[in-house]
Amino acid sequence: MVDLFSDIIKRCRQGDRKAQEAIYNLLAGKMYAVCLRYCGNYEEAKDLLHDGFVTIFTKIEQFKNIGSFEGWARRIFVSHAVEWYRKNDKMKMVDSADYFVDTACEEDEEDETGNSLTEAELLAMIEELPHQYKIVFNLYVVDGLSHKDIAQKLGISEGTSRSNLLRARGIMQKKVNNRMYFDLVSNASK
């Protein structure tokens, strides 16, 4: 796959439309999923997908063949999603000063019932988070950004980033616990 991307990138830099189409076909599904994860609206995700590919093709010269091309492209799509929300004032970040943060909630609890959630179920739960929590959760947990990086990217404080992540984790924990309880009750009644 690396050699395939190398050749396609080289051709894209020369303005080859077939190479651009090949990159689109290789990455569109994954990048659309990234866009959906951040906005949750199919039409907005399509717009972000389009904008992301326009950026990739106009800035492909900036890819220095260090790391994976897919990773570089993914960062572009994440940046577009975050910027779109900032520009459209979709994100009203919760200021950490408004809340008492209980750090004991940060530890993950194992599922002692043996039940497990599918990836689709977890993604659906993430999708139900309020936007400000979902964005921070995705940036921290899924994309691996630090609170400092998230704060800079979103124009918020590190404390607000931590608070939003903690609240997102709390909501997720409740959703997982409710699901596990429902499974336990359902299995016990069988």
Image (cartoon, rainbow, N blue to C red):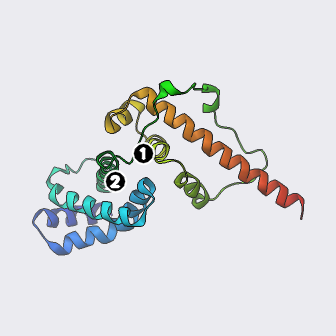
> Compared with residue 143, is residue 164 higher up or lower down, i.e. above or below?
above
* Farthest-out residue, bottom: 18
Residue 74 — which label? 2
Considering only order in the chain, which callout, 2 or 1, is on the residue closer to the N terminus?
Answer: 2
- The amino acid type of the residue labelled 1 equals Asp
| Residue 44 numbered mark, or none | none
Which of the two residues, 51 or 17, is positioned nearer the viewer here? 51
Asked whether, in this view, residue 171 is left or right of residue 159, the answer is right
Choose top left, top right, bottom left or bottom right for residue 54.
bottom left
The structure residue drawn at horizontal position 33% and vertical position 68%, both measured from the top left corner, is 26
Mark 2 Cα-neighbour bin, 10 Å: few <14, some 14–19, many ≥20: many
Residue at (13, 62) in percent of width and height: 13
* Residue 151, image x, y percentages: 37, 33
Q: Secondary structure at mark 2?
A: helix
Disc 1 is placed on an element classified as loop
Query: How far across and down, in percent of the image, does residue 10 sit?
Result: 16, 63
What kind of residue is marked 2?
A: Arg
Q: Residue at x 44, y 33 (%)?
A: 161
Q: Given the current orientation, which residue lies at the most extreme right position?
A: 189
Give residue 55's quadrant in the image: bottom left
Q: Is residue 102 left or right of residue 69?
A: right
Question: Horizontally, is 58 left or right of 113 in the view?
Answer: left
Quadrant of residue 86 within the rendered picture: top left
Question: Residue 144's x, y, as percent?
Answer: 43, 41
Looking at the image, residue 169 lies above or below residue 30 = above
Say the numbered circle drawn on residue 143. Answer: 1
Q: Quadrant of the C terminus?
A: bottom right
**Nearest the eye: 139 or 127:** 127
